[in-house]
Image (cartoon, grey):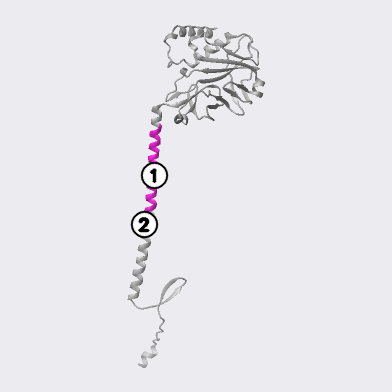
Amino acid sequence: MRRRLGVIIWVVLVSLRSTAIQANKTIPAESLDDAIIDHVNNFTRQPRTGAIYNVSLGSIPSLGGVEVSVLKLRSSTFWSRGVDFGYFHVPPRIIARPYVKRLAILFEQLQSQYYQVPGYQLVAPVLGISVYDASTSNNSFIGSQKLNLSTMGNPISFRFPSSVQINHTDYGSIRCISLGKSFEITNMTSPNVCSSREQGRFSLGVPTSRNNHRKEGNEGFWGWWVVRIASVSVVLVILGFLLLSIHRLMARKRIKEMEKRSDQGVPLDTFYIGRSKMPSASMIRTHPMTVENEYIS
């Protein structure tokens, strides 16, 4: 009761200031969630399982540009079949925890004005999906407990409208942005398609001009270092070959000088051992000198 009263007060205050709200103003995510859930529960009573309800939020000025659809399912059906609805594809083999008999899936499409991402400009609407307990009461569509999802198979995919027009030069810089408590930037899995193993809100964004300049600066910086390292490597290789050639020339010069000096000295015979030329002195037997020869002389 206290939570609902707070939501009503918040809606009234925002409605009174609706004329002052500009496109660049954002609403806290928690307040936005509370307002949407409260309005959905007031929209219909005793919803049928398996039926999709499109909830109109036109009566609330603060929620302009928000489209909401709700689907109530059995947990067993959600696990075995998954859900295909509009821009959302929820594959089978996803478990909602803690276990509940029935659950409510909330599909959202919001204008990008509700979120501001530092360094990025949103270029597509915000698509959101969240799962709540729907087995506690038949009177309310969505329960107060938000469930966690455990993905056993393929991730949840979000296909953004094909009407999103992006310049061809900027298409390679489009990123998927997860709009949770902290922003998570990932690549698209295919054109205009993002995937996630978690529930939440997602959109497409491109880096702002400042971020682009920073990226170009980083690319130029790293490119300069690559060129410099490559140049130094080439110089070192050339210097190594040059030093090796000088060493070989000096060794050959020393060998020639040694051969020249040997030719100027006592001539020696030569012979070969393998391919090596070796000097050889002729053998001269010396006559033995004995003590007897000294006495005879």
Q: Is residue 217 on the magenta stretch?
A: yes
State the quadrant of the N terminus.
top right
Amino acid type, callout 1:
Ile
State the quadrant of the C terminus.
bottom left
Q: Check the image and report above or below for 100 versus 232.
A: above
Q: Which residue is mark 1?
A: 229
Rendered location of residue 197, percent (x, y)? 56, 26
Tag 2's secondary structure? helix
Q: Which mark is residue 243?
A: 2
Amino acid type, callout 2:
Leu
Q: Quadrant of residue 129?
A: top right
Q: Which residues are magenta?
A: 215-238
How busy is the neighbourhood of tag 1: few (under 14 within 10 Å), some, or many (20 plus)? few
Q: Which mark is residue 6?
A: none
Alpha carbon separation for disc pair 1 and 2: 21 Å
Q: Principal SS element in the magenta part?
A: helix
Tag 1's secondary structure? helix
